[in-house]
Amino acid sequence: MIKVGVVKVGNIGISTIIDLILDERADRDDFHIRTISTGAKMGQNEVNDVIRRVKRIDVDLLVFISPNPGARHIKHAIEEITKLHLPLVIIGDKPGERAIPFMKELHLGYILIRADAMIGARREFLDSTEMTLFNSYVLNVLSITGVIRLLHEEIDKVLYSVKADTPIEFPEIIVTAQKAVSYARFNNPYAEAKAMAAYQIAAQVSEMDVTACFWV
């Protein structure tokens, strides 16, 4: 049985279900998942704690999910975790695209989801209800446009390579609208076009939110 570690630092929309989509019926017997999370926080103390905990668990594969994998504290966590010499796949959002050279240098897999946008609200305008609604809408879009299936299939490929002890072909994916819907496998071209439009709109949400919250 393959042991998979899922490390969540901070939160993006897909974080809440990333460890569930691989075994949604809890009936797979070829792997076991162990999840470590910092919750919403992603400061130095939280990062140091998660590094310590990751070093203590016995796993064969790691999936690391965080906003902006190139941010200082997140980058430090990734660097420390790579010292374990375990297969590692990074899942992040659009700002993570700036960290691609860093991830390539460390020979990491990555899946960067442009439509998993940050809510981008001032503290006085943000509450738990709004946050929950926002993330539910994000998950709606990611599900219907093919992103969930993409994550499932690409992580499964790595998992099966680890299980078979064969060379791993790590994903190096920026999830554009075209890439997402290619995994959704729509039969209806009209539905496919609408899904692409939905993904493109979702990808612009964080920029619109930042403008509304901080520039207006």
Image (cartoon, helix red, strand yellow):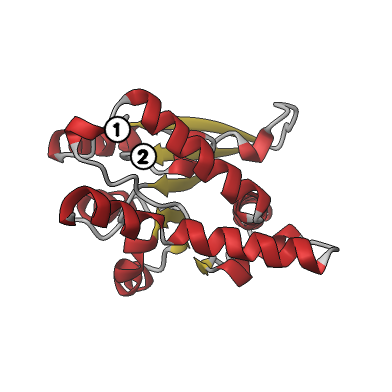
In the rendered image, residue 172, in percent from the top left (x then y), is placed at: 50, 69
- Amino acid type assigned to the residue bearing label 2 in the image: Asn
Q: Which mark is residue 40?
A: 1
* Residue 166 visible in the displayed image: no
- Amino acid type assigned to the residue bearing label 1 in the image: Ala
Classify residue 88 by image quadrant: bottom left
Dot 1 falls on a residue whose secondary structure is: loop
Vertical placement of 146 versus 46: above or below? Answer: below
- What quarter of the picture does the C terminus occupy? bottom left
Classify residue 112 by image quadrant: bottom left
Residue in the foreground of this view, choosing between 174 and 23: 174
Question: In the visual, does 49 lie left or right of 55?
Answer: left
Residue in the foreground of this view, choosing between 112 and 45: 112
Residue in the foreground of this view, choosing between 105 and 185: 185
In the rendered image, residue 142, in percent from the top left (x then y), is placed at: 58, 50
In the rendered image, residue 209, in percent from the top left (x then y), is placed at: 31, 51
Vertical placement of 62 versus 130: above or below? Answer: below
- What quarter of the picture does the N terminus occupy? top right
Q: Which mark is residue 65?
A: none
Determine the residue positioned at 31% across, 49% down. 81
In the rendered image, residue 203, in percent from the top left (x then y), is placed at: 45, 60
Q: Residues within 10 Å of mark 1 (few under 14, many from 20)?
A: few
Classify residue 35 by image quadrant: top left
**Disc 2: which residue:** 11
Q: Are the residues flagged by discs 2 and 1 in contact, CB closer than 8 Å?
A: yes
